[in-house]
Amino acid sequence: MKVLVVGSGGREHALCWKIAQSPRVEKIYCAPGNAGISQVAQCVPYGAMEFEKLADFAKENQIDLTVIGMDDPLVGGIVDVFEERGLRVFGPRKNAAILEGSKAFSKDLMKKYQIPTAAYENFDDPRKALAYLETAKFPLVLKADGLALGKGVLICNTLEEARKGVRSIMEDKQFGAAGNRMVVEEFLTGREVSVLSFVDGKTIRCMTSAQDHKRALDGDQGLNTGGMGTFSPSPFYTKEVDDFCQKYIYQPTVDAMAAEGREFKGVIFFGLMLTEEGPRVLEYNARFGDPETQVVLPRMKNDIVDVFEACIDGTLDKLELEFADNAAVCVVLASGGYPVSYKKGYPIQGLEQFEHAQGYYVFHAGTARKEDQVVTSGGRVLGVTAVGDTLQQARANAYEAARWVSFQDMFCRNDIGKAIDEA
């Protein structure tokens, strides 16, 4: 069969790499792709938001399955466009992708269906938000309602910080139209865990747990990013936690969306906080996480194409997910200045070392091909992933492999997975 993947980051590289392992797949295309993806798929020059052009391409090239990696096209309704054209596509429709597209919607859904989350208030008027802050308890969290590349969240320790945050989100539009509405949320403390799941509208199958590191610098300092590294599994995600989440969070979320007439088919990403009072939902995403995908898929034993098709066909209940009894760590190599401003076009050295290294992977996030060289073309450039028998071993392997690669102004966090030692 022929498969088209939509997107251009490390997540899409990991997806293409995993799809390529399926004996059912003879050809993979990726739109628009990147330099790393071009080694396993044919890149085609269409942007992720060019729905009609992508659908035309899928029709003309008799694509059997399209997999949407990114949030923007899902929230924009790409799945609806493909389905209207009679094309087979993996991902939620527009009315279900709102689970990620609007934080206000998802918070209201959790309140209505009693899914455990932080206390909150929604605002579409900055004056009302500022008035609310006067009696609020600190610290608190401000979240832009819409998509903001994982950066639309501000943690405010003081009233003055919160006032500035409201102005930057709602008045100065730091995150664009995503800040037309805003959620003011209780600040939760505990361990963060990410759980990705496959959903077919009624059945949910969870993948192995992971933990992301959002801040740019060591010690969780610096600005929020799209993610600087991950590890899987999380030693803090115990069977007791899983049992609670299955009963009170995972299935109730799928059932709530169905009850609202928003049947969800695709991937739901659960961002959880393990508080002293129990697990709470921090956020939902309507697609694979980045860079969580880069540590979850190397541990997955299933043919991922079978899982995609079960989600589309509503037969996920007949399938069990299997993961290797090992661990994986991903370290993101980024351009100096990320996530604010950075230069592009620097040649990358050392990539050839991954070609025959068993258990070591390099997933391209922001790369391009310039003549015969691979060069940097984004803030997050590469995700270096390694597996090991234990998390400590996987972490040592990932940092060893990160040293194989170099480019000008490269930086990474040196403490990805350090929390493992505290488990």
Image (cartoon, rainbow, N blue to C red):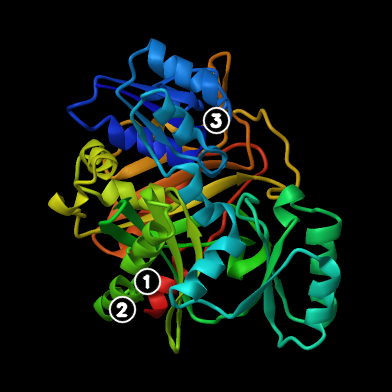
Crowding at mark 2 (Cα within 10 Å: few <14, some 14-19, many 20+): some
Q: Residue at x 81, y 53 (%)?
A: 173
Query: Which residue has dot 2 on it?
Result: 244
Q: Residue at x 40, y 64 (%)?
A: 256
Q: Please state which of residues 85 and 97 is positioned toward the viewer in this rendering.
A: 85
The answer to which of marks 2 and 1 sits earlier in the sequence is 2
36 relative position to 148: left or right:
left
Query: Which residue has dot 1 on it?
Result: 249
290 in relation to 157, above or below: above
Q: In which quadrant is the N terminus drawn? A: top left
Whether residue 58 is visible here, answered yes or no, is yes
Q: Please state which of residues 310 and 346 is positioned toward the viewer in this rendering.
A: 310
Query: Which residue has dot 3 on it?
Result: 48
Q: Residue at x 19, y 45 (%)?
A: 302
Label 3: element kind = loop
On the image, the x and y values in percent for residue 241 come to 32, 78
Whether residue 228 is visible here, answered yes or no, is no
On the image, the x and y values in percent for residue 193 come to 42, 68
Say which amino acid is labelled 2. Phe
The answer to which of marks 1 and 3 sits earlier in the sequence is 3
321 in relation to 7, above or below: below
Q: In which quadrant is the C terminus drawn? A: bottom left
Say which amino acid is labelled 3. Ala
347 relative position to 289: left or right:
right
Q: CA distance from mark 3 to mark 2?
A: 37 Å
* Residue 45 lies in quadrant: top right
Mark 2 near mark 1, Cβ–Cβ under 8 Å?
yes
Q: Residue at x 27, y 81 (%)?
A: 240
**Discs 1/3, front:** 1
On the image, the x and y values in percent for residue 356 come to 29, 32
Q: CA distance from mark 2 to mark 1?
A: 8 Å
